[in-house]
Amino acid sequence: MEGHVSAGDYKDVVLFLATAGIIVPLFRRWRVSPILGFLGAGVLLGPYGLASLSDAAPWVAYVTIDNPGEIAQLAELGVVFLLFMIGLELSWQRLRLLRRYVFGMGALQVTLCAGIIAAAAVAMGQSVASAAAIGAALALSSTAVVMPILAERKRQHSQAGRATFSVLLFQDLAVAPILITIAMTSGRADQGLSPNLLLTFAPAAIGVLVLLAFGRLLLRPMLRSVARAKSEELFMAACLLVVIGAGLVSALAGLSMAIGAFIAGLLLAETEFRHEVEVTIEPFKGLLLGLFFLSVGIGLNLSTLAANPLLIPALAIGMVALNTTVIFGLARLFRLTSQSAIEAALLLAGGGEFAFVILSSAVGGGIVPEAIAQTVLVASTLSMMSIPVLAAWGLKLGGRKVTPSELPQEPVESTAPAVTPRVLVIGYGRVGRLVGEMLHRHEIPWVAAERDAKLVEIGRRSGDAIYFGDAARIEFLKRCGLGEASALVITMDDAEAVETVVSLAREQRADLKIIARARDARQAERLYELGATDAVPETIEASLQLSEALLVEIGVPMGLVIASIHERRDEVRKSLNRPEALGGRLRRYRQSGEPGAAP
């Protein structure tokens, strides 16, 4: 049977991929957030952009989006995956360490900004419910824009960076209750708090209980079973099932899919699969979130800006000014330096991606009029597009050296986990377990990564911090603590995997101490070339241990035996580490009869 394929059926997909593959990389090169690239491309490709010129120039139909509704429906998954990742990255330890800024400064920022904006909206003629939705939407900043800026400029561990992260964290936590409230009050804005309204929470409560029960009882065993299959494709499918399945259960309960995904992320946050799931989901989140912002740009009617050339810019400027003032005041109240306070305030001054989600939900529920929502969204978009400029100003003002009198009166909590791994152990087989036991004896904190789900389960039962995942991926290593660890020990028996991990780790960090397990002298030499600080060949170590036992048994004093063994080990290490200077010596050593050495 012949298949008939029309190029027009795939035009929208091709335009999106072209945006992701051409326009966004240009924005990265210009050091501008890719999100702004997707937003700009959406405006250009949408019905209010080039498509508006189709009557005068019919050819523009080939480079514009034909079905924005279908794009928007798929783009909703971008927010679903974003909230899943937010839930996955949360932990009780992180919340505890940053509780003062998260639940103090963050809560006050959202409450004050939302309240002031809502009061202004009421004064301009909006109903209380509509004003509350607008205030909640505009009180949230852009995690997707701000955090990459902090990471790129290496400011995430500065005082301003920690405060900014804490506020964003509370804002992310606030999204779920805001969406639940909007979902429950949709179509009932004038009823107040009635028994009938309270009854509508019952399906939502049942849905949340189902998700919690499923997560507690079945989620970890399911992922453990899939992990034992040792198939990346199956694990990826299981991760997608968790995200989308949890979202559908939430949607059936009357909530948004994003809420269900957020709960699923929270349930996985404390499991051994957390980091591998993060690495697996990240590409989907990035692509779908890009599609979400493309969809937002498509829906922006810039004629609204032309019709209100003074009102919309005034709203955007007022929003930025309000957020800057409130956050600066709160930052000083929480004893941040004036430079850090202004940097954090400018970073958080712009609007965020959840404004589109909240207002879209409010419009769909009949809470906010569509015309008002469109005006507010255009203003929010303008403020979001100003974030890179605001961040540059903040870095210029806040990145200066502070005087001793401006230092905080009390230490600022770190965003690092309570137990920062000094050593990252890759492989939890017989060798890795022994290394972990020795680290325990010396009270050195460590974290392990292992690809075998059975070994991970054994380690977890023993109380060790072990994560399931593929260490041959740099993103997984970073999430396990590569950036904070002082040493990396690789105990895997897979020679190719060991070399890959050594190469990735050394490329990422030049100061890291890397101790790697090698099969023989040849692989040890290769590991030194890749950047290992030390490589331990199994065959040579076995020979040295046999020699030690032999010498002791035939009567050589123990002290002399230990000294000679250490001396010989140092000679071998030097010869392997500097083959160009000691090549002849290495060849003579190999020819002397080293077990397993190549002839």
Image: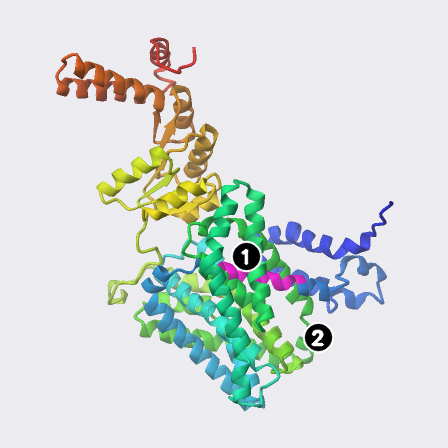
Residue 84 in the magenta stretch? The answer is yes
Q: Is residue 302 above or below residue 480?
A: below
Dot 2 crowding, Cα within 10 Å, few <14, some 14–19, many 20+: few
Q: Secondary structure at mark 1?
A: helix
Q: Colour scheme in the image?
A: rainbow
Judging depth in this view, the residue of 45 and 382 nearest the camera is 45
Q: Which tag, 2 or 1, sits closer to the chain's start?
A: 1
The answer, for residue 338, to whether it is visible in the render is no
Q: What residue is at 67 percent from the left and 54 percent from the top? A: 19
Q: Amino acid at mark 2?
A: Ser
Q: Which residue is mark 1?
A: 242
Where is residue 455? Give x, y as percent.
40, 41
Where is residue 343? Give x, y as percent.
41, 65
Q: Quadrant of residue 251?
A: bottom right
Q: Quadrant of residue 163?
A: bottom left
Q: What residue is at 39 percent from the left and 65 percent from the top? A: 166
Where is residue 432? Give x, y as percent.
34, 36
* Extent of the magenta region: 74-85
Tag nearer the camera, 2 or 1: 1
Q: Secondary structure at mark 2?
A: helix
Q: Is residue 61 above or below residue 531?
A: below
Residue 421 in the magenta stretch? The answer is no
Dot 1 crowding, Cα within 10 Å, few <14, some 14–19, many 20+: many
Magenta stretch: dominant secondary structure: helix
- Report the Cα–Cα distance between label 2 and label 1: 41 Å
Q: Which residue is mark 2?
A: 303
Judging depth in this view, the residue of 444 and 311 nearest the camera is 444
Q: Is residue 321 above or below residue 404?
A: below
